[in-house]
Image (cartoon, grey):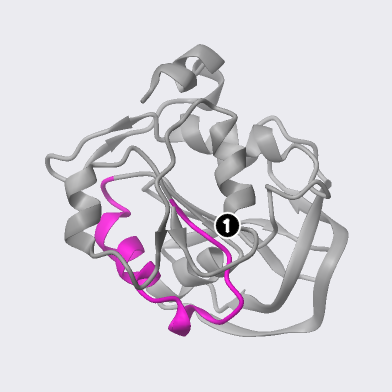
């Protein structure tokens, strides 16, 4: 977990603890790419944060370095950082939203597989992803067009603008389980990965993948 000095970081940690995972947390200015690589993590998560991706320390470098090798989930600020890495922009949202539950829509694929659409989620943000680049696809959105989810078209790289760890979000645990399942096997050799259908991954497989 890359911590962008956010109050929600350890709520995310607690969410992943529910899958019997060991979660290591590093602040975005207290870890190097080499130290992360030496750990050979099975997943990475880029936390929310109070500022913009430009002030997110090593977060964008982590995404750029590891997205071909390991499943990455970006939440809120992490989601915006993913968009910027591939050439997108971060802009002011039309209306800042903090601590509100809104409905988002999705196609039921990837990390949204098996989840209802619309889906009630918690929003805490005044910035949003804009000019989504061709390498990424929009996976979730609001009725007024705010991008709420992004995924890379080839690699297990996913971002959500909302907070799956919040009690205001429905099915946050299931979304986290989908993320853990989509990139179930990691290959540190040539930056490849094996993508398995979410439906084929049982809870026991997720728990044993440590």
Range of magenta residues:
45-69
Any part of residue 86 in sight = no
Q: Residue at x 48, y 25 (%)?
A: 197
The location of residue 199, given as percent across then percent down, is 56, 20
User: Quarter of the image holding residue 174?
Assistant: top right
- Between 162 and 146, which is closer to the camera in this rendering? 162
> As displayed, is residue 174 above or below residue 43?
above
Any part of residue 201 in sight = yes
Please tell me how crowded label 1 is: few (under 14), some (14-19), or many (20+) other residues with Cα within 10 Å.
many
Indicate yes or no whether the magenta region holds residue 100: no
User: Quarter of the image holding residue 163?
Assistant: bottom right
Indicate yes or no whether the magenta region holds residue 47: yes
All told, the count of numbered labels is: 1
Q: Residue at x 45, y 84 (%)?
A: 54
Q: Residue at x 46, y 30 (%)?
A: 21
The location of residue 58, given as percent across then percent down, is 34, 71
The location of residue 32, given as percent across then percent down, is 23, 65
Q: Residue at x 67, y 35 (%)?
A: 173
Secondary structure under tag 1 reads helix
Residue designated by label 1:
9
The quarter of the rendered structure image containing the C terminus is top left
The location of residue 91, given as percent across then percent down, is 62, 86
């Amino acid at each position: 977990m890359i911590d962008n000095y956010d109050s929600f970081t350890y709520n995310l940690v607690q969410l992943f603890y529910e899958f019997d995972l060991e979660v290591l947390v590093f602040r975005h200015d207290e870890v190097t790419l080499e130290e992360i690589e030496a750990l050979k993590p099975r997943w990475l998560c880029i936390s929310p944060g109070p500022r913009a991706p430009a002030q997110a320390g090593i977060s964008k470098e982590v995404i750029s370095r590891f997205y071909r090798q390991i499943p990455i989930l970006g939440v809120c600020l992490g989601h915006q950082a993913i968009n910027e890495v591939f050439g997108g922009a971060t802009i002011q949202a039309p209306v800042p939203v903090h601590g509100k539950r809104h409905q988002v829509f999705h196609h039921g694929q990837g990390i949204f597989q098996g989840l209802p659409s619309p889906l009630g989620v918690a929003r805490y943000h005044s910035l949003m992803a804009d000019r989504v680049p061709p390498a990424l696809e929009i996976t979730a959105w609001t009725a007024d067009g705010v991008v709420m989810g992004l995924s890379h078209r080839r690699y297990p790289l996913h971002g959500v603008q909302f907070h799956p760890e919040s009690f205001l979000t429905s099915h946050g645990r299931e979304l986290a389980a989908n993320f853990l399942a989509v990139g179930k096997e990691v290959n540190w050799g040539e930056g490849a990965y094996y993508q398995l259908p979410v439906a084929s991954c049982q809870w026991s497989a997720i728990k044993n993948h440590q």
